[in-house]
Amino acid sequence: MRGVLIAASLVLASPTFAQQVRVINGDIEHLYGPGGQLIDDADLQARNQRAWEHMQAEKQLAIQRRQLDIETERLKLQEAAIASAMAQNWDAPNWDSTDGGWFIGSTRAFSPRIGSRLLPRMGSPRIGNLRR
């Protein structure tokens, strides 16, 4: 009886040593056999290859999206710097809006410094702005 019990336990325990182990890491799946030997079949290898290529494509898209975000932010900063420089130039002393220097259009016939003193425009604000 004892021998039969030992033999039966050995028979039941032996498949556990020859058992396959399936390891799934994200979309990639591997099949390991006895001794940790990799035993992926052709179908599983093909699926793993497609999954790996898909992950690489996703990583590349993420990199490109990040680069686009950085470039967009750089352009916004550049536009803000240009707008700031234009605002500073607009307020510069040679662009005095009180003598019409800011006016640009088809009706402008004289330079802003000379023409506005010779022929002032109607409604032009001339309060205390006399330069000599």
Image: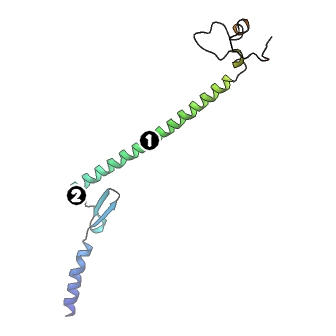
Q: Residue at x 40, y 46 (%)?
A: 59
Asked if residue 78 is positioned above or below residue 7 in the image, the reply reads above
Which residue type does callout 1 highlight?
Arg
Measure the alpha-carbon separation of dots 2 and 1.
36 Å
Give the percent coordinates (x, y) of residue 88. 67, 26
Q: Residue at x 23, y 77 (%)?
A: 14
Q: Earlier in the sequence, mark 2 or mark 1?
A: 2
Q: Quadrant of the N terminus?
A: bottom left
Q: Secondary structure at mark 1?
A: helix
Give the percent coordinates (x, y) of residue 78. 57, 31
Give the percent coordinates (x, y) of residue 86. 63, 25
User: Which residue position is annotated with label 1?
Assistant: 65
Asked if residue 123 is positioned above or below residue 14 in the image, the reply reads above
- Locate residue 117: give its quadrant: top right
- State if disc 1 and disc 2 touch (CB < 8 Å): no
Q: Residue at x 48, y 40 (%)?
A: 69
Which residue type does callout 2 highlight?
Asp
Q: Residue at x 30, y 59 (%)?
A: 29
